[in-house]
Amino acid sequence: MTKLLQLLALAAAALVSLAHAAPIPDEYKTNGFAIGCQAYTFNRFTVFEAIEKTAASGAKVIEFYPGQRLSKEEPNVKWDHNASDEVIAKVKAKLGEHKIKAVNYGVVGIPTEEAGARQVFDFAKKMDIRAVTTESFEAIDTIEKMVKEYDIKVGFHDHPRQPNKPTYRMWDPYFILELTKGRDERIGACADTGHWQTSGLNPLWAMRLLKGRIISSHLKDKADFGRSTDVPYGEGVGEIGRILEELKAQGFDGNISIEYESNWEKSLPEVTKCVEFVRDWKSKK
């Protein structure tokens, strides 16, 4: 009987572990946060250069996006979930060279049909990526099935409100909340705080509304609400320190991506300031 109870306990523990994607190792965190770059910050450059620049900024993780050119040597090769095993091996080698870990992939469309969705999740599994970012809300049922099977999280991303397209609802955190209600806990939000600001929303309020459902964040600071330019953390209206405090209070264990959408060709010094802000930030609690 004791042996049977032990086996049942092990089986129960295994089931619990399946509901929790593996955490990002502490060695890739800065001041307790997995702060890194969304490669889109360096979309004028190649994947290899984005990895190099991420390392130069002092960050330790990266979030890839589909369609970036691979390298100067192979500019016609595009990096996405259709990449060959050979290309994947090259990117892994480049990550290893610079001690950078890939933790997320997106924003990427996820088809409702299972075969197409599997291409995205197979790629994420090969890259040992913890989460995928999407806006494909119509594929929620397929996504939930994939999340359970692959143990990979999915965060629904918000772009700004589109007044001329009222059917676009991803900007609204209430929509994300309703979309993920009752779904697997590995499904939630990729909180793009800059796009919330552009939509006229207070990102700190949105973070609190989505408590328990924040998978990752595209953390931005902007000069003002509405359409304005990105600035280094702490220099805008984004209340970055308070957002970090809130994420810590929520027990957030996902990645924070710096998606810097200003000064495209020469943003590395500003991105570095963002990393330094997180590195030097001190909790008030």
Image (cartoon, helix red, strand yellow):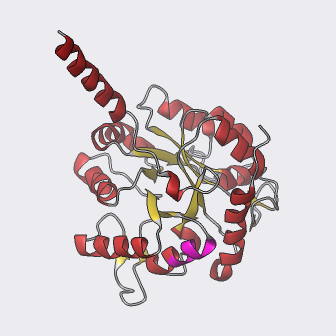
Among the 4 quarters of the image, the one containing residue 148 = top left
What's the residue at 29%, 44% (across, down)? 150
Q: Main secondary structure of the magenta part?
A: helix
* 93 relative to 244, above or below: below
Coordinates of residue 266 in the picture (x, y in percent)? 67, 82
What's the residue at 35%, 33% (across, down)? 17
What's the residue at 43%, 37% (across, down)? 186
Magenta stretch contains residue 149: no
What's the residue at 25%, 25% (across, down)? 11
Coordinates of residue 133 in the picture (x, y in percent)? 47, 52
Magenta stretch contains residue 53: yes
147 sits left or right of 248 in the view: left
95 sits left or right of 39 in the view: left
Among the 4 quarters of the image, the one containing residue 59 = bottom right
Residue in the foreground of this view, choosing between 66 and 96: 96
Residue in the foreground of this view, choosing between 43 and 97: 97
* 134 relative to 214, above or below: below
Coordinates of residue 164 in the picture (x, y in percent)? 64, 53
Give the magenta-colored segment's residue range: 52-57
Residue in the foreground of this view, choosing between 14 and 87: 14
